[in-house]
Every structure is written in C-alpha cells, then in structure tokens.
Image (cartoon, grey):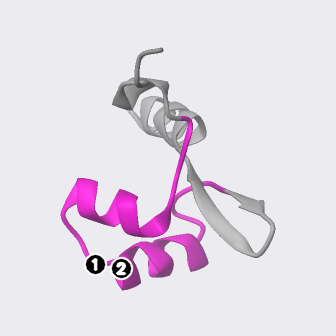
Amino acid sequence: MTEPNDSEYFIQSVESFAQRVGVSAETVRTWIKDNRIPTVKMGKRRLIDIRKLKAKLEDDD
C-alpha cells in the first residue's frame, strides 16, 4: 500500500494548512472566521476543504 501524496488530500487541519502556507494557525482561524477559506466540520474540528479552496481561487482569477 502506498502513502497518498499531497494532491490526494481533500481536507487538511488548520495547523497543517498553516504550516504549508507559512502562516500561524491563528491567522488561518481568522481567515476561517472571515469566510475567506472554505471548511468542513468533522465532529468538533473545523478542517480546510482543499478542493473548494482551489475552486474559489480559480473563480477569483
């Protein structure tokens, strides 16, 4: 069994996303609060929806 590569992840934790884009987790939480990035809720956690974010960025171009 092979490990999935980054492009196969469709949701990402706030902390992981923050590290990937080079900002603090608190900055990402602010973006979420301001509805600047799409999320999904799983249990008590709010996760970044990578597919929706990519679509939003493409629409903004």
Magenta stretch: residue 38 in it?
Answer: yes
Q: Please state if 21 lies on the left or on the right of 27 as rendered.
A: left
Q: Which residue is mark 2?
A: 27
Residue at position x 47%, y 67% from top?
14
The answer to which quarter of the image holds residue 11 is top right
Badge 2 crowding class, 10 Å Cα cut-off, few under 14, some 14 to 19, many 20 or more, is few
Q: Nearer the viewer, residue 1 or 56?
A: 1
What amino acid does circle 1 point to?
A: Ser
Measuring from the top left, give residue 51's x and y in whole percent.
Answer: 56, 33
Query: Are the residues tagged 2 and 1 within 8 Å (C-beta)?
Result: yes
Q: Is residue 53 above or below residue 29?
A: above
Residue 36: x and y in percent read 51, 63
Bounds of the magenta segment: 10-39
Residue 12 falls inside the magenta stretch: yes
Residue 24: assigned label: 1
Vertical order, 32 against 38 (above or below)? below
Quick one: quadrant of the C terminus?
top left
Residue at the far top: name it.
1
Q: Callout 2, which amino acid?
A: Thr
- Callout count: 2
In depth, the one of 22 and 31 nearer the eye is 22
Residue at 41% over, 16% down: 2
Q: Quadrant of residue 57?
A: top left
